[in-house]
Amino acid sequence: MPSITREDLAARDAADPLKSFRGRFDIPEGLIYLDGNSLGPLLNSVRDRVADVVSREWGQDLITSWNKNKWMELAGRIGGKIAPMIGAGGHEVLAADSTSINIFKLLSAALKMRPGRRVILSEAGNFPTDLYIAEGLVSLLGGDYSLRLMDKAENLADYLDDDVAVVMITQVDYRTGRKLDMAAVTKQVQDAGALMLWDLAHSAGAFPVDLNGAKADFAVGCGYKYLNGGPGAPAFLFVADRHQATIQPALSGWLGHANPFAFTSDYKPATGIARHTVGTPPVLSMSALDEALSLFAEVPMEGLLKKSQQLTGLFIDLVEQECGGHGLELASPREAAARGSQVSFRSQNGYAIMQALIARKVIGDFRDPDIMRFGFAPLYISYADVWDAVAILRDVLETGAWDVDAFKQRAAVT
């Protein structure tokens, strides 16, 4: 690698203002983990927190923990920790349920808020659960409600009309890492009289988001990718302050009641964001996410963005320099401001190549039909990691190590 050396990158790591965070994560020795865009790694403090919740809070304090250990406050407390990372007020964010359930809640509420408009607009390439939930909702409502799919968000103007009630788009495309201009898209949608729902699954915790700066109406996101809350961690939702007094939840669960322990037979929504709570919070997983998020109070978000762009840009440059001639095609935007914290390359042999990399302790993942995804979480990925990952990728390609039957057998999760 003539233009840059590993020693150059090691020196950059030594001067990295985020370098101290790496030691807070329990990442196996010798592993280069480039899949935090799918599942964040374990924080050492999370292991300790969950053990304490199990052994002391649940084991010893039992049901008194709802008050004594403030279990009932977890949803709002977690929302308050996420809020500054996504440009929201603490009273505008709630941790609850899954991303899918939260999409259902907000889409159904948005349709009620735009009577006479009966179209949900999204991208054909949006993450499948977003589209499936929308399909299910319009089927449930019947009548002339429909889901309209545009080829890509860049052509939004061609699909907006007076029938569109709400637009649902993921800010960072899960396949390619393409990142949309949140403020510009939101304005375009609202100027057409529709509401804007953002999916932040590949944004929150990877770089700073500014929902209120963009005047967004709603947002959802998950807790297990860049937020490192653990497998299947609770998700979160955002409702702008201006909508909170009038929005009507479709899922009117008992903990979203104004006085749940009055146990009345009729539903009266709680004030503010709390009305979007449905059932009893999963305390073990909520506690893990709560602890994981404590780390971000120490993280300078602009520094996170800067390192994200540097890591992804370095990876693109090195792959193109060192792995040319092997059929890899960049699927991610080349412009730093136009991509999230991941880089994707296309290859007709992408699945097998990724399995060969995983066998060599470089962990990424694959998305059909031909995309190899590499996530770069700035808190635990070093510049030297990028060099080492590309060196291993080059060797896998040059030696044909991927071209064996074992690496071509599809597992259930790719």
Image (cartoon, rainbow, N blue to C red):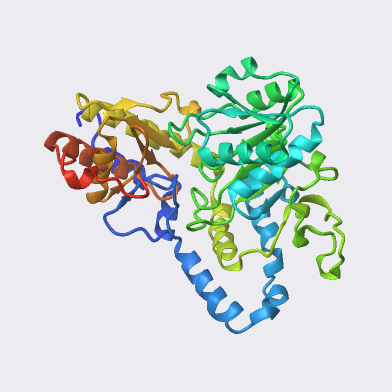
For residue 7, say whether it is visible: no
Closer to the camera in the image, 205 or 187: 187
In the image, taking residue 95 as reference, residue 177 lies left or right, namely: left
In the image, taking residue 390 as reference, residue 123 lies left or right, namely: right
**Quarter assignment of residue 311:** top left
Closer to the camera in the image, 312 or 219: 219
Residue 395 at what x, y percent from top left?
16, 38
Q: Quarter holding the N terminus?
A: top left
For residue 80, say whether it is visible: yes
In the image, taking residue 77 as reference, residue 324 lies left or right, namely: left
Which residue is painted at 44% across and 54% down in the image?
Answer: 21
Q: Is 30 above or below relative to 382?
A: below
Taking the view exactly as shown, the residue that stands out farthest to the top is 158
Residue 328 at what x, y percent from top left?
27, 27
**Quarter assignment of residue 41:** bottom left
Q: Is 320 above or below relative to 35?
A: above
Closer to the camera in the image, 3 or 76: 76
Residue 204 at what x, y percent from top left?
56, 44
Q: Is 345 above or below relative to 152?
A: below
Which residue is painted at 72% across and 39% down in the image?
Answer: 141
Q: Is 291 above or below relative to 353?
A: below
Closer to the camera in the image, 122 or 30: 122
Which residue is painted at 64% across and 25% down in the image?
Answer: 185
**Quarter assignment of residue 54:** bottom right
Taking the view exactly as shown, the residue that stands out farthest to the bottom is 60
In the image, taking residue 367 as reference, residue 397 lies left or right, namely: left
The tally of labels here is 0
